[in-house]
Image (tube, coloured by chain):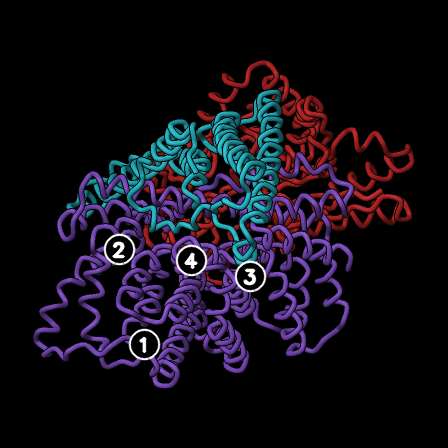
């Protein structure tokens, strides 16, 4: 068989490198019985159309930024809630806790998740040193999704919608003063061209998810299915490791280009936490029972880990 | 691979030659390529791709700029510009034909799309040039080619696409486009001067008007003010931080209405006429964009461009030969694919080669943008040709013929850029702190 | 060529015009608010910070109406472009059949396209697909607008096909091809 996998991310991204390695692992394990063509950079299908296309079976597999699905169910917001899981260990627990529900949601559309890999933790880019939340007053912060928008509002800032492509012009002309994203994205968009400081606030770790059309998967024989699942498990482990490495490298790259990378001070940390807590409570109210179960499972896992 | 290429070419030739509307010819060709040469179910791809190409924020700038062009044309502001410019350009061989080039260069600084630049500038210049008896071939040729600068002079949609997929700094790409943009403007104007002194002497290069005293020229120039205010206003809104390049298009519409109200003529009938004419043009272009997007998508589903690119990758060529081969390959591909697809499809196979050959990725981005510019004026799928056919009723092949000298000049610019990479890299390197 | 359903196509064009005006108005308002903020900062006051959320998202989908609701209207004004280099040289009796073929191909493709987009709408409704941005716009709405535009085009193509076919059967040698009009030539017939 030959599968097509559509991804919106370019070849330079570690996500794409990981996914390409996954495809190679599958081909090796099945002796070429199943080959997966990875179409990166949105070259086959644009980001918004990837999930519908996999659903329809136009392509068998796809990779998307999980929280773009936030409008479909509040569950998908879980990895964009500031303060809930800010380290790789926490994010992993959160993913394990949310996996059953997300698998269920995907199954309703005839889809099956294969693996998810996080982006490095989100922090705050500014062109001044961020020391106190009061600095957010009147600050125009790029807010690409609902939770970032609410978070910025809770902090007293003005959330602004800026298309990714418009970021450089928006910064250089003062339509945007700050943005919240990862070191990795900051590096790939050469953030040093327009900001001077990065506050490594470890707000949340959003994930990419790789998934398949369930019918296409069911058509494979047992051995091939197993090979795919094994390669996926391996890709998940590798991906999390790659994300950690990319995080360290990107932070170094930012610093070497003159961006000051610092951890937020105690006070700012508390302020960010408070703003995040409010968001978390709103989310729980909105998302209902399923969310409560998810959070309970997550806390349970964390409790076990710390024992 | 060969059968597929030939079948695609053949279908497109039959449909286009047979007089099928261009958007339908593209849709039909994509359909045949997919049903005949892939195992994909065509219907869903057709629907989702057509849908995917029909909405989008960046795209909203197109109808706005087209509308703006219609307002400028109908309110007499364009005519004013020509009357003010013509005494100044009286001594310069080529005279008002330069207005296409200068106008495109200016407008390119405001607009990131080549089709919108072409439609807006062309709406102002073509009727005026025709009325004044300039060579139609040169008027069309300069307009079609110079308006592709919309992609090279920042802001530029193509650079953004390239920057995002290859993770290059978009602001550096923008800086890098300025040098080559000015180079192309200079080359085009130089060509026009030489043409007017040679072939143009037989006619079509405009007539010398009665010389005007300098003071009168200056006094006459107030007519230019409204347009300068417009361009200044649009640029100001972008660089003053109140509008994104996409939003600036709507600013342009409102500003041109205000200016037309005070400095030309503007009333309800002009408002409606310009709006509906703008609708027709942008509908025509948007329909073709969606058709071209489906054809591009069909091609990428059949893997044809990827296989061709891999074939080049497998040759193990030296950097210069690689660039020559790549240019030929992209020129052929550019006849059929739209610019964004061209960039997306090839970067993932080509970039490793470029890095291995030690070619600067910023330089390569600018090179790609120029190749995409060229693809806008090569038939059968060339958006500037479509826009000009919409403006003049001339056939796309006739229009393409008129652009031939400029096509060659653009290739020459690439050669110059290869010989003197500083043309591209000086400004972005000066940005390094 | 006269189109009996012209009022319908014009209605479509007015719909498109409304979408285009809406895009222009929303964006202008947003820019004006930013100008106001800039002035406030200049005089030392603090920003109001009104951002109309989702302008870009709404505008992206209004664009579907702005461009595709006028498909039929654009067709009846012969503003969709084509290459007539070859067929213009054919004798009227041959040309008329060529036109019939072109119209038939165009009609078949638009019908197919409409049908497939209807399938897309069905799917959007089934899965409750919404846009990914802040506004969560249900996708069936702009998709329906797209189908309406395509359906109007189908009607216009059908009308043209029937008229041309009748001519081809009754008096092919007296066929006169619709003049190639340019967008400027039909400048003042916006209402027609
Ligand atoms: Na431009
Ligand atoms: Na072309």
Quadrant in the rendering for residue B270: top left
Mark 1 vs mark 2, foreground winner is 1
Within 8 Å: ligand 2 and the Cβ of disc 4?
no
- Crowding around mark 4 (Cα neighbors within 10 Å: few <14, some 14 to 19, many 20+) is many
Chain at numbered mark 3: B
Q: CA distance from mark 1 to mark 2?
A: 35 Å
- Which residue is drawn at the image coordinates 35% and 66% (left, top)? B105
Q: Are marks 3 and 1 in contact (CB under 8 Å)?
A: no
Task: Give the residue at mark 4.
Answer: B388
Task: Give the residue at mark 3.
Answer: B379
Q: Check disc 2 and report its element: helix, strand or loop.
A: helix
Q: CA distance from mark 3 to mark 2?
A: 36 Å
Task: Give the residue at mark 2.
Answer: B236
Within 8 Å: ligand 1 and the Cβ of disc 2?
no
Quadrant in the rendering for residue A207: top right
Q: CA distance from mark 3 to mark 1?
A: 26 Å
Going from N to C along the chain, the mark reached first, 4 or 1, is: 1
Q: Residue furthest bottom?
A: B198
Task: Give the residue at mark 1.
Answer: B205
- The quadrant of the picture occupied by the N terminus of chain C is top left
Q: Do marks 1 and 2 share a subunit?
A: yes
Colour assigned to chain A in the rendering is red
Indicate the chain coloured cyan by its letter. Answer: C
Q: Position of residue B5 (x, y in %)?
A: 72, 57
Q: Check disc 3 and report its element: helix, strand or loop.
A: loop
Q: Nearer the viewer, residue A185 or C139?
A: C139
Q: Position of residue A205 (x, y in %)?
A: 58, 38
Chain at numbered mark 2: B
């Amino acid at each position: 068989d030959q599968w097509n996998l559509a991804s919106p991310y370019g070849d330079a991204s570690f996500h794409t490198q990981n996914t390409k390695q996954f495809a190679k692992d599958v081909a090796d394990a099945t002796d070429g019985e199943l080959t997966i063509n990875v179409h990166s950079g949105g070259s086959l299908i644009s980001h918004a159309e990837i999930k519908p296309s996999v659903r329809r079976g136009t392509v068998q597999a796809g990779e998307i930024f999980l929280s773009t699905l936030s409008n479909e169910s509040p569950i998908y917001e879980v990895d964009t809630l500031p303060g809930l899981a800010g380290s790789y260990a926490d994010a992993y627990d959160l993913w394990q806790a949310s996996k059953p529900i997300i698998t269920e949601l995907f199954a309703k559309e005839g889809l099956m998740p294969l693996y998810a890999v996080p982006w490095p933790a989100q922090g705050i880019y500014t062109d001044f040193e961020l020391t106190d939340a009061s600095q957010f007053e009147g600050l125009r912060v790029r807010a690409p999704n609902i939770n970032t928008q609410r978070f910025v509002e809770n902090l007293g800032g003005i959330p602004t919608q800026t298309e990714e492509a418009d970021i450089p012009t928006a910064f250089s002309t003062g339509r945007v003063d700050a943005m919240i994203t990862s070191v990795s994205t900051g590096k790939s968009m050469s953030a040093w061209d327009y900001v001077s400081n990065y506050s490594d606030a470890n707000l949340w770790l959003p994930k990419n998810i790789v998934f398949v059309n369930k019918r296409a998967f069911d058509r494979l024989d047992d051995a091939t299915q197993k090979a795919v699942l094994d390669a996926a498990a391996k890709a998940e482990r590798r991906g999390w490791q790659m994300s950690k490495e990319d995080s360290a490298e990107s932070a170094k790259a930012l610093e070497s280009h003159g961006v000051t990378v610092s951890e937020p001070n105690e006070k700012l940390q508390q302020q960010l936490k408070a703003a995040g807590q409010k968001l978390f409570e709103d989310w729980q109210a909105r998302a209902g029972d399923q969310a409560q179960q998810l959070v309970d499972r997550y806390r349970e896992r964390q409790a076990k880990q710390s024992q | 691979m060969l059968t597929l290429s030939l079948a695609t070419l053949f279908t497109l030739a039959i449909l286009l030659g047979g007089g099928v509307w261009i958007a339908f010819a593209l849709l039909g060709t994509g359909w045949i390529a997919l049903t005949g040469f892939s195992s994909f179910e065509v219907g869903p791809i057709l629907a989702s791709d057509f849908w995917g190409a029909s909405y989008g924020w960046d795209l909203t700038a197109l109808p706005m700029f087209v509308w703006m062009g219609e307002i400028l044309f109908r309110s007499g502001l364009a005519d004013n510009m020509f009357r003010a410019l013509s005494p100044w350009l009286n001594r310069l061989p080529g005279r008002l034909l330069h207005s296409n080039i200068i106008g495109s260069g200016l407008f390119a600084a405001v607009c990131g799309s080549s089709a919108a630049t072409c439609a807006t500038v062309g709406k102002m210049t073509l009727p005026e040039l025709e009325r004044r008896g300039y060579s139609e071939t040169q008027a069309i040729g300069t307009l079609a080619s110079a308006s592709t600068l919309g992609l090279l002079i920042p802001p530029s949609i193509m650079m953004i696409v390239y920057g995002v997929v290859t993770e290059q700094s978009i602001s550096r790409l923008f800086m890098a486009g300025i040098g080559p943009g000015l180079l192309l403007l200079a080359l085009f104007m130089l060509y026009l001067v030489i043409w007017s002194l040679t072939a143009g002497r037989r006619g079509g290069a405009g007539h010398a008007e009665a010389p005007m005293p300098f003071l009168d020229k200056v006094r006459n120039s107030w007519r230019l003010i409204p347009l300068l205010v417009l361009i200044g206003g649009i640029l100001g809104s972008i660089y003053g931080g109140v509008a994104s390049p996409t939003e600036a298009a709507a600013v342009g519409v409102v500003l041109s209405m205000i200016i037309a109200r005070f400095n030309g003529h503007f009333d309800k009938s002009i408002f409606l006429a310009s709006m509906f004419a703008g609708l027709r043009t942008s509908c025509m272009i948007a329909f073709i964009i969606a058709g071209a997007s489906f054809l591009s998508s069909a091609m990428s589903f059949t893997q044809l461009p990827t296989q061709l690119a891999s074939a080049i990758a497998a040759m193990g060529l030296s950097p210069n030969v690689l660039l020559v081969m790549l240019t030929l390959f992209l020129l052929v591909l550019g006849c059929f694919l739209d610019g964004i697809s061209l960039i997306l499809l090839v970067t993932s196979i080509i970039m490793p080669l470029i890095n291995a050959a030690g070619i600067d990725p910023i330089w390569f981005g600018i090179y790609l943008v120029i190749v995409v510019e060229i693809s806008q004026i090569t038939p059968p799928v060339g958006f500037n040709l479509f826009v000009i056919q919409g403006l003049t009723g001339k056939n796309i092949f006739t229009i393409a013929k008129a652009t031939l000298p400029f096509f060659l000049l653009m290739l020459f610019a690439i050669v110059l850029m290869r010989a003197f990479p500083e043309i591209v890299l000086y400004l972005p390197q000066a940005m390094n702190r | 060529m006269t189109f009996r359903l012209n009022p319908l196509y014009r209605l479509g064009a007015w719909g498109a015009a409304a979408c285009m005006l809406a895009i222009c108005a929303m964006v202008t308002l947003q820019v004006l608010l930013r100008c106001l903020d800039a002035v406030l900062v200049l005089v030392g006051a603090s920003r109001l910070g009104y951002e109309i959320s989702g302008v870009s998202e709404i505008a992206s989908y209004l664009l579907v109406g702005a461009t595709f609701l006028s498909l039929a209207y654009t067709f009846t004004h012969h503003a969709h472009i084509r290459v007539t280099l070859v067929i213009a040289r054919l004798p009227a009796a041959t040309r008329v059949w060529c036109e019939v073929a072109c119209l038939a191909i165009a009609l078949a493709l638009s019908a197919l396209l409409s049908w497939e987009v209807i399938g897309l709408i069905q799917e959007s409704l089934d899965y409750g697909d919404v846009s990914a941005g802040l506004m969560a716009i249900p996708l069936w709405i702009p998709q329906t607008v797209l189908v309406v535009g395509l359906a109007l085009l189908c009607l216009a193509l059908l009308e043209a096909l029937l008229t041309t076919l009748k001519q081809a059967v009754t008096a092919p040698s007296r066929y006169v091809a619709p003049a190639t009009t340019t967008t400027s030539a039909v400048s003042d017939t916006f209402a027609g």
